[in-house]
Image (tube, helix red, strand yellow):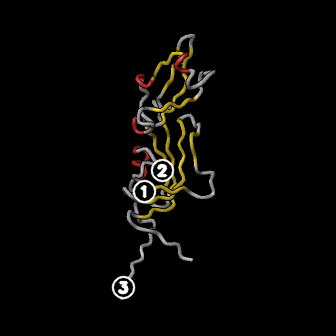
Amino acid sequence: MTQSQFINPNEDTRIAYGSLVKLHFEVSLENGTIIDSTFNRDAPVSLTIGDESLLPGFEQVLMNLRAGDTRTAHLEPEQAFGEWNPENIQHFSRTQFALVADNPEIGMMVEFEDKGKNTLPGTISAIDDDQVEVDFNHPLAGQDVLFKVKIFKVTPPGVTGIKLM
């Protein structure tokens, strides 16, 4: 007779690489402006640590937390959306830019495709009679952010949960 082992993730199970985590999170600027939040949803979201659905700096905040934990962490730009990089500013002639948008406006989001067919989003940051300037930095690049989390459940790496009725 084969014996089954039942593993019940509980408050002692800590988050590690590969863990399945149910949580609520909020990302905000230091002035209180909320960028993204799941706290207003009925159910927490699920993610697997290391699957690249969160930036590494955000995942680092989650490491070793367990069900029931809450944490608010201050993340500097290099831990969050990166430093603002002047090399990510590109200039296009108005003629060249007309292939992307007929009536460019400052603040307009535009998408370009690189040689590898990857989509590159950018924001129009300046316009003159001859050129359009596009900023390809993340809109939150160079900014400190607050990352708030509440952990509901941690399932260890390689364990599949079963819901018993």
Q: Total number of numbered labels? A: 3
The first of marks 1 and 3 along the sequence is: 3
Instruction: Please report whichever mark, 2 or 3, sits nearer to the chain's N-terminal start.
Output: 3
Extreme residue in the top direction = 129
Which residue in the protein does label 1 denote?
A: 65
Assess disc 2: are there few (<14), some (14-19) or many (≥20) residues with their C-alpha within 10 Å of its C-alpha: few
Badges 2 and 3: C-beta atoms under 8 Å apart? no
Task: Please give the residue where the numbered disc 2 appears in the rendered image.
Answer: 71
Q: Compared to 106, does 13 lie above or below?
A: below
Which of the two discs, 1 and 3, sits closer to the camera? 3
Q: Is residue 147 above or below residue 141?
A: below
The reply to whether dot 1 and dot 2 touch (C-beta < 8 Å) is yes
Screen quadrant of the C terminus: bottom right
Q: Amino acid at mark 2?
A: Arg
Residue 50 at x, y = what percent?
Answer: 39, 52
**Residue at x 54% of width, y 55% of height:** 45
Q: Secondary structure at mark 1?
A: loop
Spatial CA span between label 2 and label 3: 42 Å
**Type of the residue with mark 3:** Thr
Residue lying at the far bottom of the rendered structure: 1
Give the label on residue 2, or none.
3
Residue at point 54% right, 16% down? 95
The CA span between labels 1 and 3 is 34 Å
In the rendered view, does 100 fall on the left or right side of 50?
Answer: right
- Please name the amino acid that badge 1 sits on: Leu
> Dot 3: what SS?
loop
Specify few, some or many for label 1: CA neighbours under 10 Å numbering under 14, 14-19, or 20 or more.
many
Q: Earlier in the sequence, mark 1 or mark 2?
A: 1
**Nearer to the camera, 62 or 84:** 84
